[in-house]
Amino acid sequence: MERTSKPVVTVLTAPGEPEPPGLDGLRARAEVRFASDEQSLRETLPGTQVMMVTDFRTEALAAAWPEADQLEWIHATSAGVDALMFPALIESNVRVTNARGIFDRGIAEYVLCTILMFAKDFPNSIRLQMAHRWQHRDTEKAEGQQVLIVGAGSIGRQIARLVSGVGMMPHGIARKARSSDPDFTAVHGNDELFEQLSLADYVVIAAPLTPQTEGLFDARAFAAMKSTARLINIGRGPIVKTDDLIKALNEGVIAGAGLDVFEEEPLPPGNPLWDMENVTMTAHMAGDFIGWRRALTDQFLDNLDRWLAGDEVLNEVNKELGYAAG
């Protein structure tokens, strides 16, 4: 049913974060309120029907939840929604959507870049350049290498498409195996993870953070990998046990890691990962392209128009699974 009155929309940002760009269109459609912490959210939630959440680490919503008397829909401007999956919300009738699709291509380009950096030994080339040293080396070919993508959703699919373009063989891990898939060489079920880890040259974590994936990559998982394999994590930091990863890298259990996310963010200055020559790191920015903040707002406004018209919203999250399926 089409809605004829302006809804109340609360925008929840991180403390100190500026207003998302492009909100003039939101003000034309709704009464807009702003919150950035538990106290301000408690003040704005009563009467709020829709929330736009830009702080993907927020704990404020769980704390202020008793004040959500009219809330119908929460939109997270992130692919991961793990911070929002607290019991009261899961058990409620409030629907949750996410930013599925916005970051897929950027993340896939980041993964391909990281693979090629490892294959062509660019981290060492940069170090040699800085030292003014001319040192010829042979490097690897990416073509023919096997890439295991743990999480065969929309981001995993984009990664599979790009690595296929340079002649690599993408295999996926999903909840259930698929008999065929246009973008993957094969898609295996979760129960085949350790078998597939032993075959992969690159292992890419593209899964959401859920109770099932938290700590999934531990000493046992690293021991199952090839000693020549590299791990790339663009999913969520807590999927990898940092201490186990450091030990595996130090002892040559695996050959290297490309990391965009970490158990603790920002990564503490004293963490050994900073100084490892077989590690590349970025500051949780794999999918962030120029203009991404405005793209997130535009996506929310398009979904808000659907909601106002009484149509089904896009990217609805299965709250039991913790991600947007399908």
Image (cartoon, helix red, strand yellow):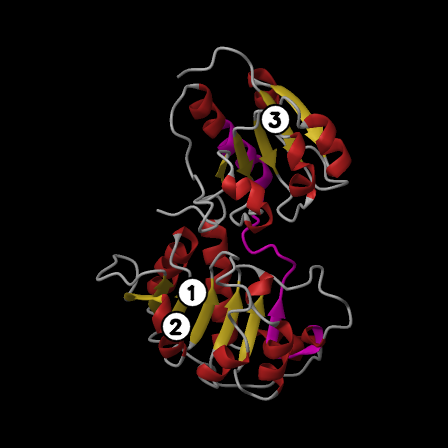
Q: In the figure, is residue 189 to the left or right of 127?
A: left
Q: Nearer the viewer, residue 225 or 189?
A: 189
Residue drawn 33% across and 75% down? 144
Residue drawn 67% across and 30% down? 67
Residue 192 against residue 105 in the figure, above or below: below
What is the quadrant of the N terminus in the image?
A: top left
Provide the residue designation for mark 2.
193
**In what element is the residue under mark 1?**
strand
The spot of residue 126 in percent (x, y) is 63, 74
Residue drawn 77% across and 40% down? 16
The amino acid type of the residue labelled 2 equals Leu
As drawn, the residue found furthest toward the left would be 179
As drawn, the residue found furthest toward the top would be 4
Residue 47 against residue 209 in the figure, above or below: above
Residues in magenta, as a range: 274-301
Provide the residue designation for mark 3.
69
The spot of residue 119 in percent (x, y) is 47, 76
